Image (tube, rainbow, N blue to C red):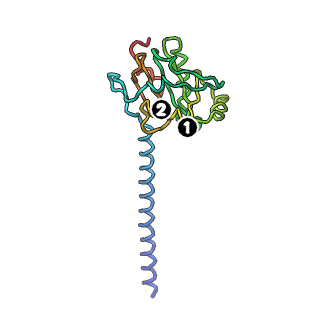
Amino acid sequence: MKQPKIWAVAILLASVGIAGSDWATNRHDSRRAAERALASVTQLAPAADAANQPAPGDTKALFASSLDNLAGQSVRLSQFKGKTLVVNFWASWCPPCIAEMPELSRFYKDHAGKGLEMVGIAIDNPTSVRRFLTEHHVSYPVLLGGMGGADLSTKLGDSQGGLPFTVVIAPDGSIVYQKLGQTSFAELQDHLPEQQP
């Protein structure tokens, strides 16, 4: 009589082990699938090829826009026409946006006064942006984009609507670089138009 109970317990334990193994495998596979999906969202968006051909996107809406600065003054973006312009869309709640800010600040400091302009457009509420920037200094101007800023980002080629999103615009108005996800000093340097010293 003891023998069937032992076999029953052994079969039960084996079944639990197999089910647990299947659960762990499925959980691991689900996590890897989620990580792959997240990585695909933060990877390089369609960008200029090695020859720096213009990327998809249209700068007309950007240069036709006016956005408020942190002091509440309206800034016409048409003032940047004819210059190399780096535009970075970000939000205070976005970890990759925050992580790239020191690199962007360093890049702007290194290139300011050399025909390059840079602007950060916050896709966030003004109170959060002002509070964030009292604790995190940036060297470049920041404008308040709100949801209209998200529309500008989309028109510049951010088809996924993700953040951060960075665009380099040549003096002729063409987009020579765009990236969805965290960028760096070196990436920006590598994609400056040739006329940039």
Neighbourhood count class around disc 2 (C-alpha, 10 Å): few under 14, some 14–19, many 20 upward: many
- The amino acid type found where label 1 is placed reads Cys
Front-most of residues 99 and 176: 176
Residue 44 position within the rendered picture, expressed as x and y whole percent measured from the top left: 41, 34
Q: Which of marks 1 and 2 is nearer the N terminus?
A: 1
**Closer to viewer: mark 1 or mark 2:** 2
Front-most of residues 58 and 10: 58
Element on which disc 1 rests: loop
Which residue corresponds to the image point at 46% horizontal and 85% vertical from the top-left? 2
Q: Mark 2 points at which residue?
A: 153
For the C terminus, give its image quadrant: top left
Q: Is residue 96 above or below residue 77?
A: below
Residue 177 position by quadrant: top left
In the current view of this chain or complex, which residue is farthest to the front? 64
Front-most of residues 90 and 32: 90
Residue 56 position within the rendered picture, expressed as x and y whole percent measured from the top left: 37, 29
Res 11 visible? yes
